[in-house]
Amino acid sequence: LAKTTQPISMDSYEGQEVNITCSHNNIATNDYITWYQQFPSQGPRFIIQGYKTKVTNEVASLFIPADRKSSTLSLPRVSLSDTAVYYCLVGDEGSWGKFQFGAGTQVVVTP
Amino acid sequence: GAGVSQSPRYKVAKRGQDVALRCDPISGHVSLFWYQQALGQGPEFLTYFQNEAQLDKSGLPSDRFFAERPEGSVSTLKIQRTQQEDSAVYLCASSLGLAGYDEQFFGPGTRLTVL
């Protein structure tokens, strides 16, 4: 399975855009890229998923360059409630639970 | 709507005791996963069920860990002769589909503390 690397932590102020880049140099042809968010004392929550180019939903955008060796989760105009740990996962149809969450990126939003 | 529920939410066990953790997935979800999350770390995969079939148990740390899903819905994770290193949050997740990358819906977890 492709190994992912993402920053340990990021700080931001309310109203700013937060971009978290995840590296996955050995991503395979059939792999999808998925991001989860986790608040303290809760289980992770699915945010967004993509295969290539750009995906946008009501919560975030996911940018994937042509070589797919990295991806960037973009959180527009963050608020205090966006303070959480964000995980980047890479896997294909048969990966099942073998997605490696890693330590994730702790995002702290301050007023 | 009803999400994934887990019970108990908190469990304190003395070293050597057996514990059983329950997961109620979302109704109709075929896939069910168990994860272990240590403090400050991301979830670590333990095992995967597709309906009642346990297709992958490669993440179970030792033979003291056992999971079942006999009727393809509720699942139980059992830990025998608990050790201090078993202290962690145990997360259950379910998904509607069969693909590994399908959205997983997580429960709140069970925090296990072994004294």
Image: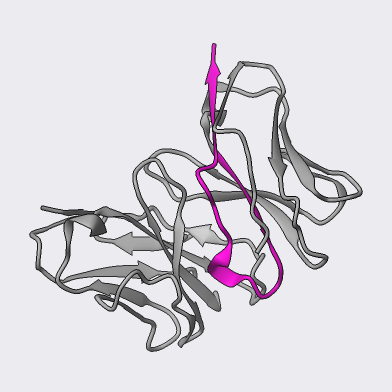
Would residue B95 be visible to someone looking at this image? no
Residue A19, position as x, y percentages in the image: 71, 29
Is A45 situated left or right of B40 in this image? right
Residue B100, position as x, y percentages in the image: 64, 70
Is A88 situated left or right of B40 in this image? right
Against A20, residue B1 (above or below) is below
Spot the residue most to the front: A26
Residue B56, position as x, y percentages in the image: 49, 79
Q: Which residue is pictured at 38% across the width and 77% down the height?
A: B74
Residue A25 lies within the magenta run:
no
Spot the residue most to the top: A111
Q: Which residue is pictured at 71% across the width and 44% down the height?
A: A23
The residue range painted magenta reads: A86-111
Is A90 situated left or right of B18 in this image? right
Looking at the image, which is closer to me, A101 or A80? A101
Against B6, residue A74 (above or below) is above
Residue A97 lies within the magenta run:
yes
